[in-house]
Amino acid sequence: MKIVITGSLGHIGKPLTTNLIQNGHQVTVITSKAERQPAIESMGAKAAVGTFFDLEFLTSTFTGADVVYLMEAWEGIGSIFDKNVDFVAAFNQIGNNYKTAVEQSGVKRVVHLSSIGAHTDQGTGSLYLHNQVEGILGGLPNDVSIKFIRPVGFYSNLYRNLDAIRNQHAIVSTYGGDQKEPWVAAEDIAETITEEMEKPFEGRTVHYVVSDEVSPNEIAQILGEAIGEPELKWIVISQEQMLSGMLAAGMNEWIANGFIAMQAAQGSGSLYEDLYRHKPAFGKTKFRDFAKEFAQVYHQQIK
């Protein structure tokens, strides 16, 4: 099949591209940076340089594709430390551009990388934007089949805690404890997307992706053992403390408030209500597998 991938060679795009090429598909990878073209072509894919804000470019690139993979990259919109970025407007524009490009190009099969929490527009913080984009794409004609992929939190998100681990010997959050929480590896998301692209498409379907379940305290214990710091703890602070710290660091106010609301939904478990009504089989990559990778990154940075 001819498949177009948005999102360049990121955490998901790279293994996804590898999987699809190995399976004999013709892959075009959209990237906003021309310097990534050699890396894309070295994998056996075609590079299309442009942005998801360019409707004409998207339509032209999608034309002739059997399947398109759509994702919204936060970093492609702007820095979360830029106080002037309007993430709500940007997500809506991207969603509408995707919808129009799919319509105008004639593509009939779409895989959309959405997110946990996209089942509702209430109580999920900034994740509600994925609900908005799902709604926009849901307005496509009925003859366009869509598979909405909803992963939970990425293992790789824990790299954001490297400085706190190094300086405070702690992971700091507004929730914690022994309640298990679902996590996912990017490789398992790529595997799920590959499988769903190669299966029949029919109507609109939702696919959650989970690799493992682990509690905050278990995360601290497992990562602490992996990096050789068994005293590592998961520490809970108030929402007010967390918000104050993020704003003091210069974070976009909308993003900061959305993060606080998202963590509240994680802590209460409400973020996962729909997931547990449709609980999928777990992926291959377990948290202890990721901990080995985390330890390598941690020790490389302190050399």
Image (cartoon, rainbow, N blue to C red):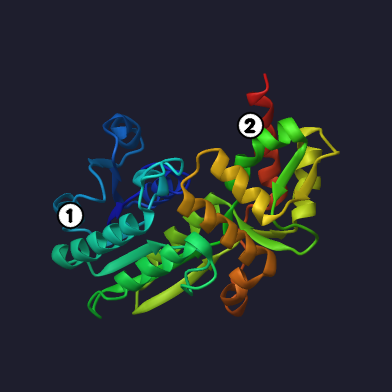
Residue at image position (48%, 62%) is 127
Drawn side of residue 227 relative to residue 261, left or right: right
- Residue at x 55%, y 55% (from the top left corner): 259
The residue labelled by disc 1 is: 55
Q: List the residue tagged with mark 2.
A: 297
Label 2 and label 1: CA atoms lie apart by: 38 Å
Q: Residues within 10 Å of mark 2 (few under 14, many from 20)?
A: some
Q: Indicate the position of residue 200 as horizontal and vertical percent values.
A: 36, 73
Give residue 143's quadrant in the image: bottom left
Residue type indicated by callout 2: Val
Q: Is residue 66 at least partly visible in the picture?
A: no
Check whether the beta carbons of the residues at disc 2 and disc 1 lie within 8 A of each other: no
- Identify whether 169 is placed above or below 271: above
Dot 1: element: helix
Please, is residue 77 above or below residue 249 in the view?
A: below
Query: Horizontal placement of 138 versus 56: left or right?
Result: right
Q: Looking at the picture, how far across and down is residue 303, in whole percent?
A: 67, 18
- Label number found at residue 206: none
Label 2: which secondary element: helix
Mark 1, other Cα within 10 Å: few <14 / some 14–19 / many ≥20: many
Tag 1: residue type? Leu
Q: Which residue is drawn at the image coordinates 18% and 68% (left, top)?
A: 103
Image location (x, y in percent) of residue 239: 66, 56
Q: Quadrant of residue 108?
A: bottom left
